[in-house]
Image (cartoon, rainbow, N blue to C red):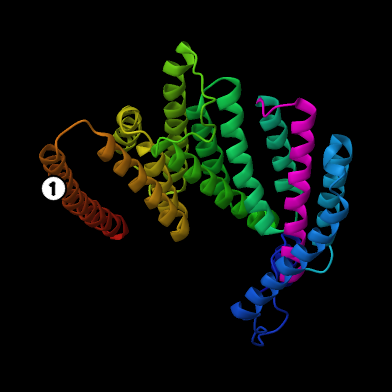
Amino acid sequence: MTRSLAERLRQAGIAVAESDAAPGLGTPWFVRALQAFSGWLAAMFLLGFVALGALAVLEDGAMSGGLGLLLIGAACGVLYTTPGDFKEHLALAASLTGQWLVAWALVETLEEASASLWWALLGLQVVLALVMSSLTHRTFSALAASLALYLALTESVAAPDIASGLVLLVLTAIWLNEFRWPRHWRAMQAWGYGMLLGLLGIEAMEHFGQSLLPGRYYPNDLLAWLGPWLGEALGALALLLLLGHVFRRGERQAPGTTQAIAYGGAVVLMLLSMQAHGLSQGAVIVALGFAIGNRLVMGLAALLLLLAIGSYYYWLDATLLTKAQTLFAMGALLLALRWALRRWWRGMTRAGERHGEGEGTQP
C-alpha cells in the first residue's frame, strides 16, 4: 500500500494498520453485554434518585422541559468522551428520560397530544439522529422519527400512507449512498436500520388494523382517496431510484428492452400494491437488500413482505378453497418464472462470453 493511499484512507476515516502484524482482539460479546447491562442498571438507579426530587418538576412544563434538555445535553457530552458500552447505554437511558420529560413539557404546553406535538418530536428526533455519536442512539432516533412522522401526518392531514412512502423513499436513498461519504457510513447504516424498523412497525400496526392513534383518525374524503395513491407513488419512485442505480452501476449495460420491462414492472407493482397494501414496500426493500448485499436488510424485508401478503390473505373476502387455489397458482407461477429467468440469464451470459471471445480473436 503506497503512502498516498494510506493517507487518503485515514482522511476518509478508515483505519489503516501500520504493519502486517495481527490486529488486536476485540471485546467478547458477553463482556459487552455485561457492560451494557451495567450501564442500564446504573442509569436506572441514577434516574430513580433524580426522579425522587423531580416529582414537583413535572407539574411545571418549563422546568420539566429544561430538565429534559439538560439530560439530553449531558448524554450527548458523555457520548463524545471516551467510547465504551457502559457509557453508551448510560447515556442512552439518560437521553430517553430527557426526551420523555421534553414530550411531557410539550403536552403540558399544548394541553393535548395534537399534530404540533408530533411535528415537534419529529424535529427533536431528527436533530438527535444527526448529533448523537452513538450508533444505538441514532438507530433509535431514526425509528422514533419514522413513527413521529406517521403520527404527525395522521393527526394533521389524515394521510398515514404518505408517511410509509416517505420513509421508504428516504431509507432507499440512504442505503444507496451508504459509501458515498466514508467518514459517515456507519451513521448512515444506523439511520437506515432505524427507518427500516420504523417502517416495519408502521406497517405492522396498519396490517393488524390498529392505528397508533386509536379513535383519533378522521379522514378527509379527498385525502382518504388520494393518500394511498400518493403513498404507493412514493414507493414506486423509490423502486425507480433503485433500478436506475442498479442499471448505472452494473458491470454491463442492460439492454433498453430490459430497462423498459423493469420500469413497467415498477408501475404494475404499484397498482398491485393498491390492492395488497405493503406489497411494493416489501419488494423494494428485498431488491434493495440484494443490490447492496446486506442480508439483515433482506431479512427485515422478508418479514415486511410476508406481513403484507399474510394480511391480504387474511382480509381477502373469499372462501378457504379459493384462497388455497390462489396460493397454489401463485406458487406455480413463481417457480415457472424462476426457471425461465435462470435459463434466460444463462443464455445472456453465454452469449456475452462468445461475443467477448469473438472480439478478442485476431484475424
Say which quadrant the N terminus sits in: bottom right
Q: Secondary structure at mark 1?
A: helix
User: From which residue to which does the magenta span run?
Assistant: 85-114
Picture layout, residue 28 above or below residue 250: below
Of the pair 165 and 253, the residue shown nearer to us:
165
Q: Quadrant of residue 12?
A: bottom right
Q: Give the x, y percent position of residue 15.
A: 70, 70
- Residue at position x 42%, y 54% in the image: 298
- Residue at position x 57%, y 49% in the image: 192
Q: Quadrant of residue 307?
A: top left
Left or right: 61 with respect to 141?
right
- Kindly tell me whether residue 143 is visible in this rendering: yes
- Kindly tell me whether residue 182 is visible in this rendering: no
Q: Give the residue number, with chain letter if any, for mark 1.
A: 332
- Residue at position x 13%, y 46% in the image: 328
Left or right: 31 with respect to 133?
left
- Residue at position x 84%, y 45% in the image: 69
Picture layout, residue 51 above or below residue 62: below
Of the pair 139 and 342, the residue shown nearer to us:
139
Q: Give the x, y percent position of residue 239.
A: 43, 37
Left or right: 118 with respect to 272?
right
What amino acid type should be assigned to the residue bearing mark 1? Answer: Ala
Q: Give the x, y percent position of residue 331.
A: 17, 48
Residue at the far bottom in the pictured view: 21
Magenta-drawn stretch contains 192? no
Picture layout, residue 330 above or below residue 190: above
Q: Quadrant of residue 360?
A: bottom left
Say which quadrant the C terminus sits in: bottom left
Magenta-drawn stretch contains 97? yes
Q: Magenta span: helix, strand or loop, mainly? A: helix
Picture layout, residue 119 above or below residue 144: above
